[in-house]
Image (cartoon, coloured by chain):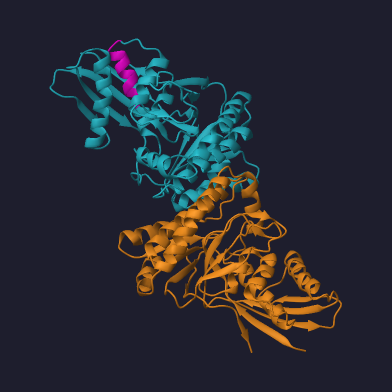
Chain colours: A cyan, B orange
Amino acid sequence: MEKITIKAHPNIALVKYWGKKDEQLKIPFNNSISLTLDNIYTLTSVEIIENSEDKIIFSNRDITQKEKNRVINFLDIFRKITNKNNLKFSIITENNFPTASGLASSASGFCALGIALNELLKLKLDKKEISKLIRLGSGSACRSVYGGFVEWEKGVFTDGSDSYSIQIADENYWDVRMLITIIDDKEKIKSSTNAMKETVLTSPFYQSWLNTIEKDLNEVRSGILEKDFEKVGKTIEHNCLKMHSTMFTSFPSTIFWQPETISIIKTVSLMRDDGLHCYFTIDAGANVKILCLPNEIQKIKLYLNQLSGIKNIIECKIGKSPEVLL
Amino acid sequence: MEKITIKAHPNIALVKYWGKKDEQLKIPFNNSISLTLDNIYTLTSVEIIENSEDKIIFSNRDITQKEKNRVINFLDIFRKITNKNNLKFSIITENNFPTASGLASSASGFCALGIALNELLKLKLDKKEISKLIRLGSGSACRSVYGGFVEWEKGVFTDGSDSYSIQIADENYWDVRMLITIIDDKEKIKSSTNAMKETVLTSPFYQSWLNTIEKDLNEVRSGILEKDFEKVGKTIEHNCLKMHSTMFTSFPSTIFWQPETISIIKTVSLMRDDGLHCYFTIDAGANVKILCLPNEIQKIKLYLNQLSGIKNIIECKIGKSPEVLL
């Protein structure tokens, strides 16, 4: 039997996705812009098996029933497309980074799986189509189908048929870096899915958040194309603080930050006062990601090494599109 | 010469004041509700002197030129009222708590000074009138003219003539306590005045914040009168997180929180999970104030003592109105 192995990278949103217009179809309320990271990745191998059910294995840890169901639902989409309802798959997947700590493991995971299934089943879907299918597995995963800088268009149709990713610039366009400070590799306090649902329903600031996104998108998109580091940096920090503020003000509130999150935020500000070029962003977790320039990484690490509570710093270049491994 | 000494207490807002409709007249965009604290206070002595200028002394530390000007401007109001433009004052003031650390030293300070001047100059102004004058010194100071639970009415008139404080319930009505955790007694990063001005001008969430206040006021006011601890507590936390979120999202952002702020926020949540009755609030600074019940204070301190970075815990009952000391 043929076995396909795909390597796909997580992506980190610079302009955040927060809230679904359609829970089922995973259509977002707003466009988002991300960068794809190299050197952290998911490896997923898929093959068709003669069995009464799918076999799903996470190499690094046990899989929960909830995760299993989510993968099976995703496989159902492909069984439906191919009209082969009895097809069963064996899936082995592993991440080289901590799962569920705001490092978007579901993004690289569902992206790798979707692309693997496209290959295995010889569907010959293009990136746009595969991005839409991957979106149904995990919203932000649809951004990982490209390397470089990527925008996920929310689209206008209620069936989600125009909600997919496009590439703004590839991984060779602009050499910026991202440092991921790992301060908490425990499972996070609440899933992104639940936190964003509560935010949409209860934060008095949610509509105001949405009203500001178009401007942030324009700034970051044009900032990338102009390679204007300050323009991109200022906007992503503001965007990140706005997103977390919608969570702080939801009811019950969601506070993903840990004490170290604040230490790093303040250190980034201090480093800028000292002339370095760096800006932070934080996803649905406690870890802080620092956007910076290649020639200043060593200086930045000197500052970060003086802080307590940072377990690890992962240094990333901009990553490329998913690859088929032979 | 007669010398008047007044003891006045700071107040902590349960529903926050954040943003001025009129900078000069210190008319707020929204009503606020506070409780007055006992056992921390400002002592201010005032007398009339034969001198070419006012003498202003802070017992605990040097006074800045900016602070001096602010006090002189306040004295000018009283010189104007009395039509005695050449009157000069000697003022000695001291706090028994750290200044400018989010502990509202300007509140008790201007309240004590305003009441002292009312006595010294025999103005015989009632609480409503004196509250309006004190407001011109420092907005939130106008709430310290009463003990117990106090509401500052924003008023509707552009001259501020109906913007003053009223008492919701006195200090004997309901025995709740406030623990003030001192984690940072340094001068704060930005003055409240500047932070709130930036928020009003730049936070995309400011209008949404204002839209939610009426509901918070109703919940806290009725919660106090009904002695419904949970109702008051839930609302004050939500209100505090909303206010800080308007600062986080202003541009440039203002983040008064320190790492320890997050530790204490999370500990309050943990204590509630463990069955204790406690809720946090945070002003324009890093210190966290915990509203709690008298019989649970010792248990709460056990939790707090396990955290690092707390320099001191000040335990307060509900305070009374300012007093003339003989």
| Quadrant (top left, top right, bottom left, bottom right) of the N terminus of chain A | top left
B213 relative to B299 in the view: left or right: right
Which x, y percent locates residue A290?
Answer: 52, 39
Picture residue at 36% right of the left edge, 33% below the top:
A105
Magenta residues span: A110-122
B152 relative to A155 in the view: left or right: right
Picture residue at 53% right of the left edge, 32% below the top:
A177
User: Which of these two is toward me, A9 or A257?
Assistant: A257
Q: Is residue B292 visible?
A: yes
Q: Residue furthest left?
A: A52
Which x, y percent locates residue A50?
Answer: 14, 18
Which x, y percent locates residue B160?
Answer: 68, 61
User: Which of these two is toward me, A100 or A212?
Assistant: A212
| Quadrant (top left, top right, bottom left, bottom right) of the C terminus of chain A | top left
Which x, y percent locates residue B206?
Answer: 57, 47
Asked whether residue A45 is drawn in magenta, I would say no
User: Which of these two is toward me, B135 or B214?
Assistant: B214
**Magenta part, dominant SS:** helix
Asked whether residue A116 is drawn in magenta, I would say yes
User: Which of these two is toward me, A131 or A288?
Assistant: A131
